[in-house]
Amino acid sequence: MAEVTVGNYPQQRVAPSYFPTIPPIAPDAAISYCRSVQDAPYTALMGVVVDARNPSRHPVTPRCRMRKLVGSTNRWRLPESLGSDLLGSSQAIKAINMPYNKSLISLITAESPQLNMNLDITIPYSFRRSLDRSYTDSFVAEELAKKKMSLDTVIPPSSPSKMRVGQPSPLGSVKKFVPTNARPVTPKDIFLYHSKRSKSFLGPDVLLKSVGMDWELHRPFLRKAEVLVQLLKEADDPSFQKYYRSPASETLDTYIKKNNFYSNDYKEMSNRLSLVNNPEEEESKGVDHPAHISEKRVNNVTTIKLECRDPLITKSALAVALGNLYHEDIEVHLEDVANVLAAASAIGYKSLMDECGNLMLRNITFRTVCKYHQAAARYQQEHVVLACERWLELNLIPQLSSHIQLREVPIDILQKVIKSNRLFTYNEHSIYKTLSYWLFLQLNPGIQLMPSHSTVLSYFNSLQKTCSFLEKDEGRLYAPLFSSIRLHGITDTNHIQDMQIMNILPQCQLINLLSQHYHSLQGGGDMEALKNFTTGSIRQGFIVDEEPHYHSEVLSLHGFHFELKAVRSSHGHVAFYMQRLKPGDPILSFRQCERQTFSMRPDREVRYCITVQQLDSGDHNMLTTGIVSQKFGLGDKTSKSEILKIESLDSAAYVTFALMFPAS
């Protein structure tokens, strides 16, 4: 701004002011749709409160189309009156009480408000979602780039000679900073981390060649590994060799020893001073290469070779196994325990194998059970194999069936678990559903997320209907697996209908299933075709994972209904038993009371077994009543089964009720 003189006093010249122009008034046709959206809950409620008339609707034009339904929270947009729709009325009232902010407007209109304000009424309204998405993606990418630049920008500290006396440091206290592009940890780093803890200043006297690397070892520490000891006995006489990289690297190592800290900066300097620029080329060079020559480091070295063709043995795992030879306390990370077990088995390190087995026992989950079982079976860890199978028997249906790791279960282990008498399941249909999911994952190995039930149902329904899947050439392999299912325990008509749609099982098995149900209903519940309780009983169960006061479920079978109970008494123990129900019992649902069959036989002979299982850190505890035969009546004294009691619930209890109706 320039100065001007008024009289004897200079003054500043005032710059001209600029005001934005008044925005044009939007025509009614352009904003009518937005107004109708805001007034929609009022007009919908007016039809309910006033005279039950249909609310006024916005006319359909090329510019706007009134949606009939946009999500479960916008039911007040329906063109008809709400009438007796209580849910729609509640949602309309909530829409009135809530303020109309930008987020709410975007949810109500299902579009961006700026796109609705198209002032040109002659142009039909068009959706520009692809343009908005590209704008959003570019905006997000730009923001991420800015954040990355701010993180990568490091202000260098000021030089001490240029700093003023008494001036505080602009950076304050020095903080530990880990760059995003830090050098990844190599197997050599892992091995040196463990071996340096021995505080041994002697040069190595054993050179192990394995998995494409040279491992410099010390003979006194190899006594723990039986295989390495045997290789040393069979090795040739030690040879006079020179090792380490270069004099410059050796000088740097000496400098590091004299200091109390060791950081990645020295590693980077060491790599720069090395005569070898490529790390892969450095690992491929032996100790006799000129780049490794050191005049001061000379010793008699025995060279041994160990061939490892096991895919589980990686360089990092072998580095951990060899590094643990140098200290008494065994240190293994949980994510590498299976690979370290393989490496420990290869070198014959018995103590490390036992520690890996104990670590596996304490950390069996749906993510690790298959890998642990495979590694333990290969390296003779029988207690780990047994613990994994016990875990699968209890958690195959509750946990593993809903995760993608289900595909990793081998078919022989899956069949063994399904046939086990200790298998826990909610009902017999849960086993069929789990096997169908497993089969879907085997046929579609590219799937990375657990599919929904509708996806599995649609996939098998899309296959050719000339015959069932198990009758085809590619399905005969899985026929023994599905034959382990107790199909006679699937009594729900909806479940049987899904099995018919999927067309996995042969039609003759489904016809036999329906025939057994019909004969049992006509014969008063007798299951004449089933003789063996172990393979013919029908199971239903539930999980109690905390101290319950009361848990109840209903088991309905061929006109007889039983309540499965878990009750905690005042003394602290938990009682499990089942009780026959009368028609019209309050615990029965409307469908069970009004739609399902009820048998009025005064007594019904039932063979049953109640089992409670618990699994805690690999320890499997099971309490059962055994197979009991009892006549259940409708009276209070004859309607209850034997009571199975446990003192306390230290861990989750898997409760299974198995019963069968013999001929009577």
Image: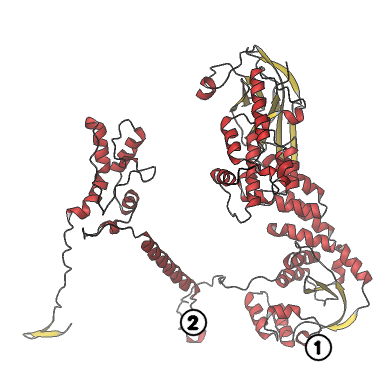
Residue that carries the numbered disc 2 in the rendered image: 158
Q: Which of these two is toward me, 7 or 127?
A: 127
Residue contact between numbered discs 1 and 2, judged by CB atoms under 8 Å: no
Q: Is residue 418 left or right of residue 178?
A: right
Look at the numbered disc 2 and give the secondary structure of its residue.
Answer: loop
Determine the residue positioned at 42% across, 65% down.
137
> Can residue 511 be seen?
yes
Q: Residue furthest front?
A: 466
Could you tell me residue 67's position as x and y percent? Answer: 32, 46
> Can residue 258 be seen?
no
The N terminus, quarter of image: bottom left
Q: Which of these two is toward me, 611 or 197?
A: 611
Determine the residue positioned at 66% across, 19% down.
525
Work out whether 191 lies above or below 286: above
Report the Cα–Cα distance between label 1 and label 2: 41 Å
Q: Which of these two is toward me, 79 or 393?
A: 79
Could you tell me residue 486's position as x and y percent? Answer: 70, 33
Work out whether 441 lies above or below 90: below
Coloring scheme used: secondary structure
Residue 295 is tagged as: 1
Could you tell me residue 20's position as x and y percent? Answer: 18, 68
Badge nearest the viewer, 1 or 2: 1
Q: Earlier in the sequence, mark 1 or mark 2?
A: 2
Could you tell me residue 578's position as x and y percent? Answer: 65, 23
